[in-house]
């Protein structure tokens, strides 16, 4: 009887494997899991006409000056001398983690001859910065939309920029293109085609792009479906991120200017749909920006820093580990909010990881899925500078490679 039971199980397993082979393949292709490598905690946007090869260092210096000029206020708002120390160190060694040279809203509409000149100059400056080691770990450009009025200019800018980079011997490994105001799956498919053609013509590999979600129709299609999910899968693995556009999206929703914020309920709805659409695909999420800058008199600096600290922390708690920064004075609070977020929970996360692997009796019985989230949390803390490899190893017995494996992604 046991032999017959075993054979029945084998027969059923074989039959189910055959029935589900297509579904298994589709699941693996559509939801490959988290992408390898480090996710930056922010993207800095700078208009192309203002970009130069020393911009990263200049932003770091301006951020340190803003911090020095308001040191007591910053210490009061952060409330932790160790975090202040880490922020100062970060501003010295890596003030920008991801830089985007902007040819869209931050740049505006200019004549073709002027934009062509800025393309050539900015691309040459980027090549110089990468060659000297002065560039941020990740970089790229934001082109104009592929909608009809700006399509020709968008393609012309991308082709020109990449041509200068390839002529300078710079590859595309660290380079990403931001595609704004995407309103259809067909635009994503067109971007996939454009990337493939540029790879074939210029010899650059691989070309990846981010999709900016700036209109309600990007979230919900006319038939009520989640268009953003179809966009992700239409990218054929080339989409590296979904970036929320705070002010365009708010304006399209008819929200009054004084209430436009990445914390508005309309923003929360859009980002919740984006989060569900991106889950398991390897596409990363980025929140938007705040245009309330910490500059001016002491009251304005306090208002800007308090708001930025609160908004960045809010995004982190909701699983948005990246956002936009628009001014050097926002860098201290970007790093402080991240360091506070991670260090607030780091000791508990490290203890739970250690207990799990040592099979220690604990009041919390973590499951493998929770262990994955704990490992990802500690790994992100390590990547951004909230912790160090030595601290993590001492507290968990794990190194970055092991953490990445547990988190479902490689280093």
Image (spheres, grey):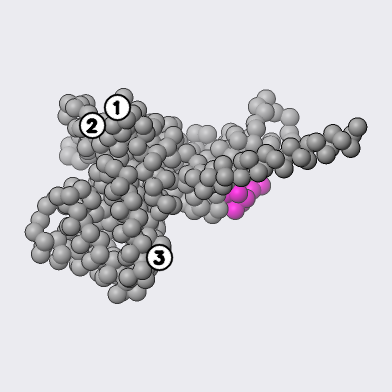
Whether tag 1 and tag 2 are in contact, CB under 8 A, the answer is: yes
**Residue numbers of the magenta segment:** 397-405
Q: Earlier in the sequence, mark 2 or mark 3?
A: 3
Element marked by disc 1: helix
Q: Residue at x 27, y 35 (%)?
A: 217
Q: Which residue position is annotated with label 3? A: 205
Q: Residue at x 40, y 53 (%)?
A: 238
- Position of residue 404 measured from the top left corner of the image (x, y, whole percent): 57, 49
Q: Determine which of the numbered discs, if any, sits on residue 250 in the image.
A: 2
**Quadrant for the C terminus in the image:** bottom right
Residue 38 placement (x, y as % from top left): 47, 51
Residue occupying the point 56% across, 37% down: 373
SS class, disc 3: loop
Residue 262 image-quadrant placement: top left
Q: Is 178 on the left-hand or right-hand side of 32? A: left
Give residue 266's mark. 1
The answer to whether residue 249 is visible is yes
Q: Is residue 169 magenta?
A: no
Across and down, in percent, residue 75 comes to 36, 37
Viewer-closest of 400 and 199: 199
Q: Marks 1/3: CA distance?
A: 37 Å
């Amino acid at each position: 009887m046991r032999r017959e039971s075993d054979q029945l199980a084998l027969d059923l397993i074989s039959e189910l494997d055959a029935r589900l082979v297509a579904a298994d393949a589709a699941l693996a292709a559509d939801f490959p899991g988290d992408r390898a490598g480090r996710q930056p905690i922010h993207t800095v946007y700078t208009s192309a006409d203002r970009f130069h090869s020393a911009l990263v260092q200049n932003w770091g210096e301006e951020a340190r000056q803003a911090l020095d000029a308001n040191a007591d206020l910053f210490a009061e708002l952060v409330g932790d001398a160790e975090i202040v120390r880490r922020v100062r160190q970060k501003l010295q060694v890596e003030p920008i983690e991801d830089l985007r040279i902007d040819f869209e809203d931050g740049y505006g509409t200019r004549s073709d001859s002027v934009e062509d000149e800025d393309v050539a100059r900015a691309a040459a400056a980027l090549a110089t910065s990468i060659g000297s080691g002065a560039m941020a770990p990740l970089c790229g450009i934001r082109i104009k939309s592929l909608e009809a009025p700006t399509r020709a200019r968008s393609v012309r800018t991308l082709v020109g920029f990449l041509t200068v980079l390839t002529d300078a011997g710079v590859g595309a490994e660290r380079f990403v293109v931001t595609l704004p105001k995407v309103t259809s799956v067909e635009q994503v498919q067109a971007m996939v085609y454009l990337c493939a053609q540029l790879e074939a013509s210029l010899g650059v590999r691989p070309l990846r792009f981010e999709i900016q979600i700036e209109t309600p129709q990007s979230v919900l299609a006319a038939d009520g479906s989640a268009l953003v999910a179809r966009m992700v899968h239409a990218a054929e693995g080339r989409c590296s991120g979904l970036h929320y556009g705070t002010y365009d999206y708010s304006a399209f929703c008819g929200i009054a200017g004084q209430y436009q914020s990445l914390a508005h309920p309309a923003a929360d709805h859009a980002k919740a749909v984006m989060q569900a659409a991106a889950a398991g695909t390897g596409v990363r999420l980025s929140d938007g920006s705040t245009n309330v800058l910490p500059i001016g008199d002491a009251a304005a600096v306090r208002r800007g820093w308090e708001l930025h600290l609160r908004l960045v922390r809010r995004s982190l708690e909701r699983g948005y580990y990246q956002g936009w920064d628009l001014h050097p004075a926002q860098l201290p609070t970007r790093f402080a909010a991240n360091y506070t977020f991670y260090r607030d929970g780091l000791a508990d996360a490290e203890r739970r990881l250690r207990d799990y692997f040592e099979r220690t009796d604990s009041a919390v019985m973590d499951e493998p899925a929770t262990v994955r989230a704990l490992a990802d949390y500690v790994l992100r803390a390590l990547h951004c500078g909230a912790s160090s490899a030595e601290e993590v190893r001492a507290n968990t017995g794990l190194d970055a490679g092991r953490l990445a494996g547990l988190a479902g992604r490689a280093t």
